[in-house]
Amino acid sequence: MKFFNSLLAACILLASVFLDVAAGADNVKISISNVEGSFLFGAVAERKGFFTQEGLNVELIRIGGNIMVPALANGDIDYTLMFGSVVRATLSGFPFKVVASFVDAPTGALVGKAGLTPQNLKGKTIAVSSFGAGAHVTAVLTVQHLNLNPNEVKFVAAGGDSNRLATLQNGLVDAALLNPGATARAEKMGFRVIAKSYDLFTFPYAGLGTTNKKLAEKPAEVKRVLKALIKGSRFMREKENRDETIQVLSEWARIDRQSATDYYDATWRGSSVDGSIPEKGLRLVIEDAKNAMKIDRDIPYSEVAEFSLVREAQKELKIKGR
């Protein structure tokens, strides 16, 4: 009986400590546009407890780029992992900044009907996720690198990979920008890869963005979010963590193990080791946004990006940034 009472007291003490920690954690909402591999670093940070280690209670919220912008501006969400959307919104006048890049290369491929080639893409329809999101920016840049004007094709917002593939399969579009797992499924259906975006160019595809207000008022919180995401990104890059990371992706995205493996093996090299924003890639994102918005003036990096906090986070983690 004495042993039982001691055990019960220990359990109560542990529960009390857990509740105190949970109560003391800061609630943070981070938006993503889908639950697919592009934002896997965020899912890993959540599932491995890296946010909790930083005293954060994080909720990953799935919303489209067109909804993310007003939600971030209004404070309904605190951060977003949609890099390109933040840059475009900033150039539209919203007080946002990108502060880190966690996927330094596009993950998609342009997939279409048999017989569709770069030479006969003109006038065709291409499915993307949502306008301004990473898949849309990737599709635009892919078309440009295939020597076509983006105005010579029609982009259709169709949602996540599964929806884009279904739209292609049902003949509603001629091509779709798909991530590796969906690309593999499309090829089994008889569709062909027109171009692999990651073979044509690199640019920050997913990262962390927030408001100028958050940067000014809560820089310590921003650094804690950055540190958790850096840990998540580094974890998924380690070879010994491959199987566990694939399992996280399979469960999080609700895809079969083989699709998760295809996605991971095709994209892990493009994930960031430290969250640094590659300036060359950032310039490509800026120029794409300028072209889309018909902006002629020069845009300095400092207008859309804040580099100092990720460097401070790297220093606190004892990581040498690029």
Image (cartoon, rainbow, N blue to C red):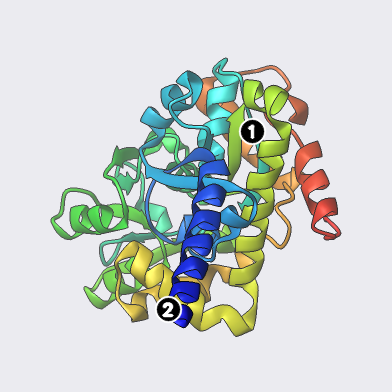
**Type of amino acid under label 1:** Ile
Query: Foreground mark, 1 or 2?
Result: 2
- Residue 147 in view (yes/no): no
Q: Which residue bears the numbered disc 1?
A: 286
Q: Which residue bears the numbered disc 2?
A: 4
Indicate the secondary structure of the residue bearing disc 2: helix
Give the x, y percent position of residue 187. Answer: 30, 73
* Residue at horizontal 29 percent and vertical 66 percent from the top: 254
Q: Relative to the observer, which residue lies in front, 24 or 272?
A: 24
Tell me if mark 1 has few (under 14), some (14-19) or many (20+) residues whose alpha carbon lies within 10 angstroms of its own.
many
Give the x, y percent position of residue 2. Answer: 47, 79
Image quarter in which the N terminus is found: bottom left
Give above or below for 93 relative to 315. above
Give the x, y percent position of residue 150. Answer: 44, 37
Disc on the earlier residue, 1 or 2:
2
Q: Relative to the observer, which residue lies in front, 200 or 315?
A: 315
Tell me if mark 2 has few (under 14), some (14-19) or many (20+) residues whose alpha carbon lies within 10 angstroms of its own.
few
Indicate the secondary structure of the residue bearing disc 1: helix
